[in-house]
Amino acid sequence: MRYRRLRNSGLKVSEIALGGWLTLGGSVEEKTSIDLILKAFDAGINLFDMADVYSAGQSEVMLGKALKSLPREQVVVATKVRGRMHDGPFGAGLSKKHIIQACEASLKRLETDYIDLYQFHAPDPDTPLEESLEALDVLRYQGKILYAGVSNFNSDQILHAVSVAEAYGFPRVISSQPRYNMMQRSFEDEVAPACELKGIGNIIYSPLAQGILTGKYKTRGDYPPDSRAGTAAGKFMQDLLEQDTTWVTLDRLRSVAAETGMTLTQLALLWNLRLPVVTANIVGATKVSHLEEAIGTMKFPPLDHETLTMIERALAS
């Protein structure tokens, strides 16, 4: 495994992270979920990314159970706050009241005393950012969180969060969690430059375009029964898989992967990591084989100029 600092922080995380969206404690039963976390750690993964809303808190529960068998000081526990956890005006959002209560609930599910990286899951237009960051300051003072991050923030929102934190002495935002992959590259336009400017590392979600870049989709309309393409969560995938250009691009990328001796999954993960502003890719897994393939990416060196050029040609419409 290789590790990178979250840019201007001292927090070093594995280039591959294991995430819990829709899988751990959700579509994956408890024993397998815990097994996946333990196998990931044994392979060198130290970053585990959850959220309180993932499977109604069960992804955090799974990580908490796994932590009992792991050296806590070597694990980077990341989770998020913002989504709706209960009814009423304080059941969601980034108000100070909700953040404090949500953090306490996450700590109980995780069965730990502190969260390494606590992230705003998305912006909250109903709450001043000053209030939200003040809540993190309280939690930091109490020793319940170590670092602060954001997810799904655009460049202006990231820069505003940095500015507010600097002005008030609130916890510095060290990480951003955007969607980024070969099929969705808007991250490169504004968010990446803003993070580069402010020394913020990016923990990428959906690096495989929700499974499109795994190579499992071979023919239009013929999707594996266990795939996400046939579910509501796969709406983005369904739209993309209806486009002729998608299939042309996938064929080209498979050829590039074959030339390098990698799977398409491994090529896609390494491609994201070509950018210094990208710190890690979050992968999901429902089977040990999925996890092993992602971890196998680390046996390959960073992509060279020739391979990167071939990929850009493959992605050109």
Image: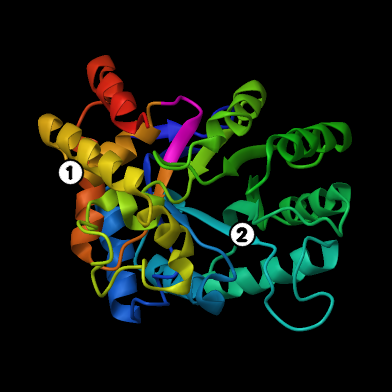
Q: Residues within 10 Å of mark 2 (few under 14, many from 20)?
A: many
Q: Mark 1 or mark 2, which has the lower sequence index?
A: 2
Residue located at (41% from left, 66% from top): 67
User: According to the image, label 1 marks what residue?
Assistant: 263
Q: Out of 306 and 9, give the one closest to the viewer.
A: 306
Residue segment shown in magenta: 275-280
Numbered disc in front, either 1 or 2: 1
Residue assigned mark 2: 80
Q: Can the viewer see residue 111 in this picture?
A: no
Question: Quick one: quadrant of the C terminus?
Answer: top left
Residue 205: x percent and y percent?
A: 47, 50
Crowding around mark 1 (Cα neighbors within 10 Å: few <14, some 14 to 19, many 20+) is: many
> Which amino acid is tagged 1?
Thr
Identify the residue shown where x is 47% and y is 33%. Answer: 278
As drawn, which residue projects farthest toward the top? 305
Residue 276 falls inside the magenta stretch: yes
